[in-house]
Image (cartoon, coloured by chain):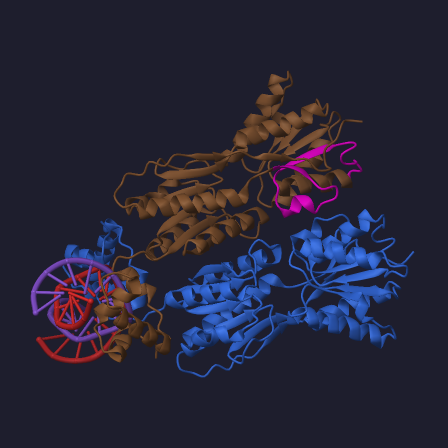
Chain colours: A brown, B blue, C purple, D red
Amino acid sequence: MKATIYDVAREAGVSIAAVSQVINGKGKISEERRNEIFSVMERLNYRPSLIAAALTGKRTYTLGLLVPDISNPFFAEIAHAVEDQAHQRGYSLAICSTHNDDERIERYLSLLQQKSVDGLIIGTGMDNVELLGPLIEKSVPIVSIARETLSSHVVPVLVGDFAGGCMAAQHLLQLGHTRLAVIAENLKVSSSRERIRGFRQTLEAAGLALPETWVLAGGNDLLQEGKRNAMMLLQQTVRPTALFCCNDLLAIGALQAAKELGFRVPEDLSIVGFDNTILASVTDPPLTTVAQPIAEMGKLAVNLLIEELTKVGTTSNVQRTVIEPELVVRKSTGTIS
Amino acid sequence: MKATIYDVAREAGVSIAAVSQVINGKGKISEERRNEIFSVMERLNYRPSLIAAALTGKRTYTLGLLVPDISNPFFAEIAHAVEDQAHQRGYSLAICSTHNDDERIERYLSLLQQKSVDGLIIGTGMDNVELLGPLIEKSVPIVSIARETLSSHVVPVLVGDFAGGCMAAQHLLQLGHTRLAVIAENLKVSSSRERIRGFRQTLEAAGLALPETWVLAGGNDLLQEGKRNAMMLLQQTVRPTALFCCNDLLAIGALQAAKELGFRVPEDLSIVGFDNTILASVTDPPLTTVAQPIAEMGKLAVNLLIEELTKVGTTSNVQRTVIEPELVVRKSTGTIS
DNA sequence: TTGAAAGCGCTACCAA
DNA sequence: TTGGTAGCGCTTTCAA
């Protein structure tokens, strides 16, 4: 039913070895034979089985990508960037939404291992780094994207989270705000912590404090969570005039809360997001946000990974890469009135 | 370096056949042996190679998903739904962004074929259906999602586009609008055409006409395109009071155009979108839109596909499935003032 | 119940 | 330049 290398060899009156050579452009085959074989392959609509090739030790040309949730625009954009570059390099992508659930991660990891992916890109949080052990042992190269290093064997590609937090603070400070609060995702996520650290440090350098009670975090449904936390912040008698939200979804939730409570943005409240996903450009007012260079990160991650998995033997010597973020000022921030 | 079935067999003092049986829960192996083998597998951290298994004719447990662009929230949500269900059924997903480019589609199709995916879910437009030929010959089951049938061999899972168009029209009609226009994506896409057809028919049934000049389409950057087309529509001396946009991205573009031109939504202009992606809930005002039951469609598509590929031999007799959409009324539509 | 052995489609090494 | 052939790791008869 499906043409194999044997069919081609038979039709062309050569050995399968010859056909294999032609497929891989190796060995020495005369022009004549080569062309003959090509034409037979064409005629039979022959497609070499990557499965069989992989079994003999070649690569599978498949990369695994772990993200918390592909329907979250940030990760969708990451996936897009990664896929694009992978495709360019001849690899395809197995995408896995982990829901940040270790059990699911374990299943996926095991599956990817069984499928012998050539490399792994991790964009999901992981409570239990041990789960990577088996992969590392089998020396499957791993890079993490937008996440701090998980282990010394994982090369991270990340955005300057700390710097991003600083930028947000600086911007808000310049606008004259003095009562600032933070809404974060999940403090287990290192990038959130870094952003907050940058934010706080910049504030303190300016002689302002960021009280612990004004750093709210947690929750799974980001939009809801952002809204809920913003509500709490805004209903206090002394309320913040500016909010730094650790991602766009949270910022949008905050935006909704503000509107619901009758605060005008940015006149009564400034909001800064993080990520610069499509969402940020679509809200009203559009969101001032710290942009992650998603396309660049995706591309870099794939390139590092492929570089890693193509150089055999050589000890890996790639180090962490940090790409600087950029503040995109839109309409959700302004001077205090 | 990596444990194989041989290692397990040797350690356990049995034949590889026995191990294989245990793995697959087939054949008759004594409790004792079985447990012994299991414990050895555990100890060796053995993971059966799916590659090798696939080579012997078993499935690869991989499904291919073709979408135009995974970073578009609609397709990201589709991907999420599909992945979720696939994972539940023990399959993983190779996701491919085609950019609606036939050349890219061809490359991906060829790749998926070489990887022997068990089935294909197509959510992308295809100018050249012929490309599916090779897959169909190899009897790889294919379902299309949110797309009209591409060929008699492709089972479609779609939303009632026509009905959705009707709903939008009805809603607008009820609000008293009489000058309605349409902004569409690309008239090559059958779903767009169907939506418009439903919309127009409902209008006509109410004695209203939808002039061809008020049906604008085309473009690749949906947001921009929606904005541009809305601009054109709104700057005419006799302008529409209501816009039906064939997807949320277009609707958001229209929303931005309206604001830029100083029209209030919904007081001066009503806008209805289509899809009900997360974007629709995030704009201001939030978008009234026709909701596609994305999760349901994704689940159904996967189930149909797996059903198809598990029943050997039996002639496929699954027929097209249409899930009805639902109008979600938010704040972008209102009575004319 | 168990095991020996014949593939699955392809690569790579070694002879010819 | 070519072709023969030994695997790669696993499934699956078929005998024992």
Q: Nearer the viewer, residue A271 or A281?
A: A281
Residue most extreme to the front: A31
Left or right: residue B80 compared with residue B91: right
Residue A313 placement: quadrant: top left
Q: From the top left corner, tell me how far across and down residue B81 is, in percent.
A: 55, 60
Q: Quadrant of the C terminus of chain B?
A: bottom right
Q: From the top left corner, tell me how far across and down residue A317 is, in percent.
A: 33, 36
Is A150 one of the magenta-colored residues? no
Left or right: residue A61 compared with residue B156: left
Residue A317 in the image: above or below residue B186: above
Which residues make up the magenta segment?
A261-290
> Which residue is pictured at 34% across the width and 79% down the height?
A1
Res. A140 visible in picture = no
Is A264 one of the magenta-colored residues? yes
Q: From the top left corner, tell me how far across and down residue B110 is, in percent.
A: 42, 67
Left or right: residue A242 compared with residue B150: right
